Amino acid sequence: MPDTTVPPKPRGRLFFANPGPTNIPDSVLRAIDRPSVDFMDEAFIALFENCVTRLKKVLNSSGHVFMYAASGHGAWEASLVNLFSPGDRLLMLESGYFSESWTEMARKFGLVVETVPADWRRGAQADAVKAALAADTGHAIKAVCTVHNETSTGVTLPVKEIRAALDQTRHPALLLSDTISSLASLPYDMDAWGIDLTVGGSQKGLMLPTGMSFTVVSEKAMAAHKVARLPRHYLDWSVMLGRRHKSFVGTVPTQMFNGLSESLRLLEEEGMEAVFARHRRLATAVRAAVRVWSANDGPQLFCTDPSRYSDSVTAILMPEGKDAEAVRRAALGRYNVSLGGGLGKLGGRVFRIGHLGDLNEPMILGTLAAVEMSLRDAGIPHGKGGVAAAMESLAS
Amino acid sequence: MPDTTVPPKPRGRLFFANPGPTNIPDSVLRAIDRPSVDFMDEAFIALFENCVTRLKKVLNSSGHVFMYAASGHGAWEASLVNLFSPGDRLLMLESGYFSESWTEMARKFGLVVETVPADWRRGAQADAVKAALAADTGHAIKAVCTVHNETSTGVTLPVKEIRAALDQTRHPALLLSDTISSLASLPYDMDAWGIDLTVGGSQKGLMLPTGMSFTVVSEKAMAAHKVARLPRHYLDWSVMLGRRHKSFVGTVPTQMFNGLSESLRLLEEEGMEAVFARHRRLATAVRAAVRVWSANDGPQLFCTDPSRYSDSVTAILMPEGKDAEAVRRAALGRYNVSLGGGLGKLGGRVFRIGHLGDLNEPMILGTLAAVEMSLRDAGIPHGKGGVAAAMESLAS
Amino acid sequence: MPDTTVPPKPRGRLFFANPGPTNIPDSVLRAIDRPSVDFMDEAFIALFENCVTRLKKVLNSSGHVFMYAASGHGAWEASLVNLFSPGDRLLMLESGYFSESWTEMARKFGLVVETVPADWRRGAQADAVKAALAADTGHAIKAVCTVHNETSTGVTLPVKEIRAALDQTRHPALLLSDTISSLASLPYDMDAWGIDLTVGGSQKGLMLPTGMSFTVVSEKAMAAHKVARLPRHYLDWSVMLGRRHKSFVGTVPTQMFNGLSESLRLLEEEGMEAVFARHRRLATAVRAAVRVWSANDGPQLFCTDPSRYSDSVTAILMPEGKDAEAVRRAALGRYNVSLGGGLGKLGGRVFRIGHLGDLNEPMILGTLAAVEMSLRDAGIPHGKGGVAAAMESLAS
Amino acid sequence: MPDTTVPPKPRGRLFFANPGPTNIPDSVLRAIDRPSVDFMDEAFIALFENCVTRLKKVLNSSGHVFMYAASGHGAWEASLVNLFSPGDRLLMLESGYFSESWTEMARKFGLVVETVPADWRRGAQADAVKAALAADTGHAIKAVCTVHNETSTGVTLPVKEIRAALDQTRHPALLLSDTISSLASLPYDMDAWGIDLTVGGSQKGLMLPTGMSFTVVSEKAMAAHKVARLPRHYLDWSVMLGRRHKSFVGTVPTQMFNGLSESLRLLEEEGMEAVFARHRRLATAVRAAVRVWSANDGPQLFCTDPSRYSDSVTAILMPEGKDAEAVRRAALGRYNVSLGGGLGKLGGRVFRIGHLGDLNEPMILGTLAAVEMSLRDAGIPHGKGGVAAAMESLAS
């Protein structure tokens, strides 16, 4: 068993196939690597405003942008404390670990969360959402909360269909959408899809380090903010509206904007359609590999609904009784490949491959090759030839 | 009047004499400039824990460290939401813009703030604090809040004397101390001074970019946390205690720790006593220059109590009717020197020189020279020879 | 045919599988990314001397090190102009493009070059060298010149056997060895192997940018230098011996030494034996892939002597009538993988995979996968399954 | 005496006031800090050719550019070995250490050097040059060699007047000009001034690290090259003309071109006239300070001809019996300011302030302040108030 020996210290580049954060292009890292400037200086404000304008284009949104020196969880919290009052009711679409976390957070703030339950391998169904909305004849539900792309399961929810459910039931609830792991990776059309609030972070499709997040807010949500009574300050939009950047309470993380401007430039240069197509192409190849591995009672795709396969992250379910952590340890210790682990109740049962951000064919094929070797090293039964299938997929 | 012409685009290095953020050493910036890693990876956790241990040494503290992906305002908010319940009473020592901000924040969370009022040019007096505590025979005051070094005024408060006021009145209130602009710049002895909670950030004496902050918490404050009922999640210590790093809700900003480890190494190499002495030496030189400028009704030191001169930031009060912003514009536009402006009610009336972090004699003398030329360019009356006085101060 | 469309701009990291220069670790690039310092400053001189000492250990040499702000060709030229006089005779072992280049250079300086001819797919044989030396009864041959690892062909010459040929014929010629593409990648024992001069550069196994090179010189070669009459100055050892660093005529490239110190640290941390083993392991996998591709009249290993397979670069011979450049274009344009082309008379007939420096399994497997897809894209007949064979090789 | 104690380790940024290399802007360092690319790749070749075109504009030249992986001494050597044959005669204008070095080098290659002798504090006079040329009725002199800006003495030679001397004597000699420390800092008009060969390097006005240099060559000099018989290869223009880049024998230092493109962008953005004016303004301030120091038998300007003051470097002559090294040690050890030392026969007798490249007012004023304090620390008599005079100079 190779596990008992100390592996040689891996050399060469770390393959970061963990779905969060993600690979950061050199030009973005180098742009961030600059001395401090005054965040009230006109030159910086011009850069800031330019970034905000371009970021809205990525989301196809005309909303208000509020940015936070915080990770994505901070932006979630901002969405709650700025929109709601104690006792307000939310309809949460179960999707996985992150819909659970958002629920836990909402309850901490005294909100009442009604869940549309779901099999994590598929995520909540639009019909069930529609039924829940139809049942709420008194319009007690203030908002419907969706995780657009559930990072823990590799399932993408059809936010557009959720909008349709709201429209069809003529329900006035706000529609909130967490795009942490879909932003700038999967198609997203905030205005056209009728989304009232989008939560996004720096560390995935924007290809930046962790530490900045934001919400984009529709006019309808701004109206809700006016009457929201949850206490808040660091994340308070009203405080922000009185400040120069209309974002950030306190010091602005200026270096991040050097990086953001460069990552937006890269996205613009490639073109968003090409960015999405690239993610789809690489994700399809990953799934082709997993399907091969799944032979002989091997690991299989966690998501069971092909229409909801995520193009930014794939969760892979281990055969019964086999530990996903053994695969991750082998991949990291022997091949310098960092895979994501299972979150919450999926701990040990799945491992995840992030395939978003600054990624190309040889990066994903190198990763898949290392995973296939790690399955072997860890003694996990699996079909051979996953990499060849991925190559076949990419070539077609 | 030179102001009417477009200045030549300044070349050479920006002199960042703005008190927040501050100069970042090249080795720290380069350490941050690294690809993403898994924050749950053992190698990262070892780095994290090592940094926490060393950070506590800088503060001379044995407390619990909770870290946030947030700026300093986030750490303030963490101190409030984790320690208090709605209606709790705080005693806030007025010092300037930042004690006002902290007050504003506390009130947003339904806390009752009693202020020890003060002349901003001196800050709250220990006697007045003592009197307020003695008057609170029912011990309604849950905490005394101090800004150790008021960044907006350049006044350092004697936290040790505040502790004495608590001891002498046998008042059980917690003692909270904001060290944003004193951390790793001015002497600080958290345990020995009996401080229950210290608020610190990344972007000043720790010589890092903005975006990470922390609180260090005594056992007494941890006990208070157990009964605190303000809603919270992103900043919740109890949530953190259940997680691997005992810090951060959500993704950990791993790059920051590469930088923190390097900045701690620099501090350790120089030695904290030497770091403090260097700040004192450079601050003394700045004040020597300002005293010369103050002749002929020129700008003067804003702080009027020599025992409270800040060794990390100096605020300079403009002559009546003269605009501080004109000086700042000249310094930035003509000499590539970024000075701090007046905050809140001091807007336009003071400018500020930050002299903390990675700073040495020629940096401060170059800055002072540019300020002296900017005073001239902006038509502000002033005594000549400030730089010579600073050199004299440094040589003695 | 996909070739006729403009390929999408490749995203993600460039896979640099070109044998020169090579992949540079982030920590090395970041170490180089520092402001200028005075090369006569004591702190720099200490760094310089430390690097020289450690570099000699990598070569197992006790010789004199002379360093140049120059690429490897500059170090070759230094070896000639410092050791010889017009009309001196050299015995050059033919190995490929680089032995030809060295020959061309020597003739420019008026040296007489006698070649031990060879099939480029094997390189000169020790017996032929011995015969040439035995025939030189008058000891007109001043030096035997070998390219330890011929970068153009992927053939490693047995320098130790060449030494034996000198010893067996009791020939007093110097033994010169070019280690540009073997340094710090393949085992090398300068003193024990009786090598009189080693030529090395920064840009391959030392994992640095191009621009610095060096020679390490035995006492015997130093004696030859004393009587050498070729004109020289920029590369003149005698000039260098009179200077502070005993290296460099003119300004010293200080940033390079920040990087060299870090790259030596990485080598030391891994251990040279582990470094060599890693190169062997990865090279073996590459060859396993090529053997599979060679089926169906596909591309084949250029080197035909298994005992001389290079563990740092593999040259791959195209099937008759097929253009290697089409493969390279597909790999770069579609998959962001940079392969080496054929040099000199091998132009268009071979492509080369560099597998040296900061490299690991997923990097090489991602590269091989991209090459296999590029063969298909370019319409080159080949056996399928090269990547699988490489994985098999690595797993065993 | 402070000298006997170990100084505290200086913190803050090193002030690099050493005339070679010079300050490198962050954006240039970050541009260089990139992975390797294939120097034969079309994208790189486009970058290379773009840089060459823009570099020629900086020099106002239409000549051929040949670039070397070498420091400036390598470019000097290239100028000699490519233009001359053994026994050729050069007329060298004495200016200081570097004209001596060039002479030494030429003699190593068997060239006959006739010197126009000069007081180093003024440099060779045009009249003397004219006389020497007029005396050479047989036109044995093949080239006149000038150091445009003598880095060791801070004296700029009027190359245009030297051209006039050639024209007036109708002498056909080539005119060679070393611009190492004037390039992109002082006005230079290669074509209009009738210069046949310009030697330049990366590490001064181009604000790059040491390690790349170049010659720009007129058609007349190209014709001379055709008959030149000195042996050469690494620096051989004819070899280069047969290669893809028409520059470099061997591997191209690709990272340098990322930096060069950025440094040219900075120069273009500022505008060359503004660049020259800035150097003149800062140099005038430095000289104003030195004049004040020269009171009381203090240090004085080494250059005694105001029309030849260098605007990129100032050499300062110590009072009789005082050691310049003591000043340099104090400046570096106590204030983190790196000054240049005396070269050759000026060792210990002068120190030098480099004021070229990425430099602004506070950088030069901080430097001058540190020098003035170092004079005091080292016990050197001097007039006080040098910094104030420099400020006065800059303000006017």
Image (cartoon, coloured by chain):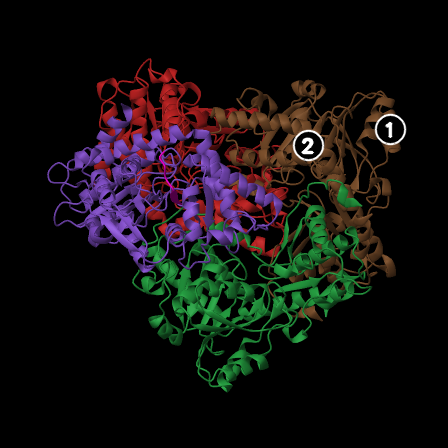
Chain colours: A green, B purple, C brown, D red
* Three-letter code for the amino acid on which mark 2 is drawn: Val
Whether residue B74 is visible here, answered yes or no, is yes
Magenta stretch holds residue C373: no
Label 2 marks a residue whose chain is C
Closer to the N terminus: mark 1 or mark 2? 1
Q: Which residues are magenta?
A: B193-200
Provide residue C379's location: percent of width, then percent of height.
Answer: 77, 65
Q: Is residue D321 above or below residue D197?
A: above
Give the vertical position of C129 relative to B103 (above or below). Answer: above
Q: Secondary structure at mark 2?
A: strand
On screen, residue A323 versus residue A58, left or right, reads right
Q: Secondary structure at mark 1?
A: helix
Rate crowding at label 2 as few (under 14), some (14 to 19) or many (20 or more) other CA atoms within 10 Å. many
Q: Which mark is residue C199?
A: 2
Residue denoted by label 1:
C130
Please state, as top left, top right, bottom left or bottom right, where the N terminus of chain C lies in the image.
bottom right
From the top left corner, tell me how far across and down residue B359 is, in percent: 36, 36
